[in-house]
Image (cartoon, rainbow, N blue to C red):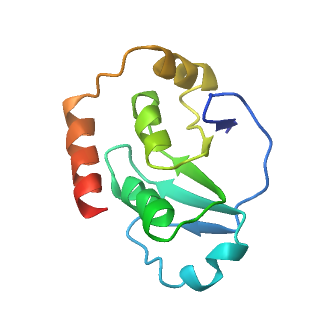
Amino acid sequence: MPLINTRAEEISAAEPDVVLAPGGSLEEVLPRLAGLAVIAVEFPKFRDGRGFTTARALRERHFYKGDLRATGHFLPDQFAFLIACGFTSFETPAEHNPAQFAAALAKPHQPGQLLRRSLARALEAG
């Protein structure tokens, strides 16, 4: 799967130091957070908003400065929200090529009902 940055450009980057599963605890990662260059956050389904919450917690509560990578199933329509939550690299799902993410950034952003609910939950929990 292609790896892209926040401008939807294909990049090459280091493998993640840690992969966080949805609903997993950050407690075991926090003591070594400063030494982690790349943290990947898994999205098992595009409807699962827990990755948004994890990203916001890492950036806003724990001040993580490294590369935060989204992996798994997310949609081009979610790309702007992923960036807003602090993700800096993205392993795009096989069914979506990187050009779809670039196109999603170019059009006015009108999230769908499901995405609005998922984001609202993530922001409330964050």
Which picture quadrant has residue 31?
bottom right
| Residue 86 position within the rendered picture, expressed as x and y whole percent measured from the top left | 51, 50
Give left or right: position of 58 versus 89. Answer: left
Residue sitting at x 59%, y 37%: 92
How many labels sit on residues? 0
Residue sitting at x 37%, y 69%: 23
Which picture quadrant has residue 108?
top left
Which picture quadrant has residue 113?
top left
Residue sitting at x 50%, y 41%: 83
Residue sitting at x 29%, y 22%: 110
| Residue 17 position within the rendered picture, expressed as x and y whole percent measured from the top left | 70, 68
Picture quarter with the N terminus: top right
Give left or right: position of 16 versus 119. Answer: right
| Residue 47 position within the rendered picture, expressed as x and y whole percent measured from the top left | 31, 45
| Residue 87 position within the rendered picture, expressed as x and y whole percent measured from the top left | 54, 48
Give left or right: position of 112 versus 22. Answer: left
Residue 42 versus residue 94 in the image, above or below: below
Picture quarter with the C terminus: bottom left
